[in-house]
Image (cartoon, rainbow, N blue to C red):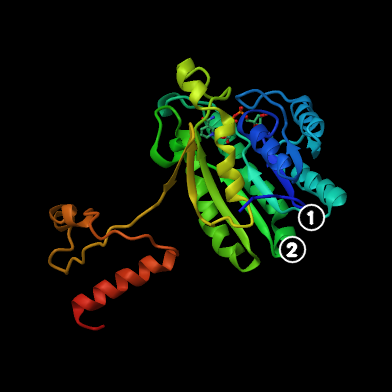
Amino acid sequence: MTIRFDGRVAIVTGAGAGLGRSHALGLAERGAKVAVLDMGGALDGSGGSATAAEQVVAEIEAAGGEAMACAVDVTDFAAVTAAVGEVLARWGRVDILVNNAGILRDRTFAKMEMDDFRKVVEVHLMGSVHCTKAVWDTMRQQNYGRIVFTSSSSGLYGNFGQSNYGAAKAAMVGLMNVLHLEGRKHDIRVNTLAPTAATRMTEQLMSPEALELLRPEFITPGVLYLVSDVAPSRTILGAGAGVFAQTVITETEGVYLDEAQRTPEGVAAHFAAISDPANESVLTEAFHQTDKFVRMAAKHKGVD
Ligand code: NAD
C-alpha cells in the first residue's frame, strides 16, 4: 500500500517552521496541494511576518509541489475564515486540516499571569477550534475530511511549569472525542498527535545528542497516516525519535457501594478495588459510563 494525497487539499497551521513545516513538505511531496498557514511570530506568540509561510511555500514549489501562503493568526476567526475561503476559491475543496500552530509561555502556576494563561489557551485551543470550524461545513458537504489536533505529553501526563499549555493540550483530546462522534457519518476522521521533536520549542531543553534523534521529519509519517484515506479515528498517537505509540484513556471496572458503605470512609476503604486496573475498559461515548453504572447498581439491587 502506498499512501498518496493526489487531488487532496491540505491546510497545515504553524507550517512556517518546526513540525508544521515538516508536515507541509511531507504532504506536498506525496501530491497534496498545501496551504501553509503561519503568522510567523516568536515562540511566545509576539510579533509576526509573512516570511515564514512564504519560505515554506517556496521550498514546496522548488520541489515541484503546489502550495499557497496564508499569513494568518489562528486566534483571529475572521482571518482564518477568509483564508479558508481563499483556499476554496483556488482549489475547490479542503480534505485535510493539521492543527499544529502553537506557542509557549511557561511559568509555575504560582507566578502565572492570567494573560499568559489565556493567550496559550487562545492559540492552542481556540486556534484549533477556529480552523476546524472554518473547514467543518466543507468537509461535511464533501463527505470527507481528515483532522489532526496537536496535543503534547505535557497535556496527557503533566509537566512542571506548563499549567496553561498542559490544560490547552489536554483540551485537544476532548475536542477530538466529540468531533469524532459528530463527524463520523460524513467520513470526517479526527485524531490527535502527541509529538516530541527538536524545534525552537525544545532546543534549550535537551542535549545535542538527544536533539539529533528527535528530528521533526521523524514525526511526519505518523501525521500522514492520520490524515490518509486509511486513517483511524479518535486515535492519540505519540511520536518522536522514530518511535510511535498510542495513548488510551481507560476506566476501571468500578465497585458498587451499598447504602451502608456509600460514605467517604466507604470510598476510602474500597479505593484499592475502585482503582484496580484488572478489568479496565475503554468507553467510547459519555453515556456508556452512565449505562455501566446504572447496570451495576441495578444488578446489586436485583432489579436487572
Ligand atoms: P515551532 O515554534 O517551531 O513552530 C510553531 C509554529 O506555529 C511557528 O512557525 C509559529 O509562527 C506558528 N504559530 C504560533 N502561533 C501562531 C498563531 N497564533 N497563528 C498562526 N501560526 C502560529 O514549534 P513546534 O515544536 O514545531 O510545535 C508545533 C506544535 O507541536 C505545537 O502545537 C506544539 O505545542 C506541539 N508540540 C511540540 C513538541 C516538541 O517537542 N517540539 C512537543 C509537544 C507538542
Q: Residue at x 79, y 55 (%)?
A: 93
| Residue sitting nearer the eye, 225 or 200 | 225
Find out if the beta carbon at label 1 lies less than 8 Å from the nearest ligand 1 atom. Answer: no
Tell me the residue at 40%/51% (across/down). Answer: 248
Q: Which residue is mark 1?
A: 93
Q: Position of residue 275 (x, y in %)?
A: 23, 53
Please give the name of the residue rendered at 71% of the width and 23% of the height, measured from the top-left corner.
Answer: 47
**Depicted 156 relative to depicted 107: above or below:** below
Q: Position of residue 166 (x, y in %)?
A: 46, 37
Quadrant of residue 59 within the rendered picture: top right
Q: Which mark is residue 142?
A: 2
Q: Judge by depth and name the residue closer to the eye, 23 or 218.
A: 218
| Disc nearer the start of the sequence (1/2) | 1
Left/right of residue 193 with respect to residue 299 in the rendered view: right
**Contact, CB < 8 Å: mark 1 with mark 2?**
yes
Q: Name the residue at the bottom extreme.
A: 303
108 vs 198, nearest the viewer: 198
Residue 249 in percent (x, y) is at 39, 52
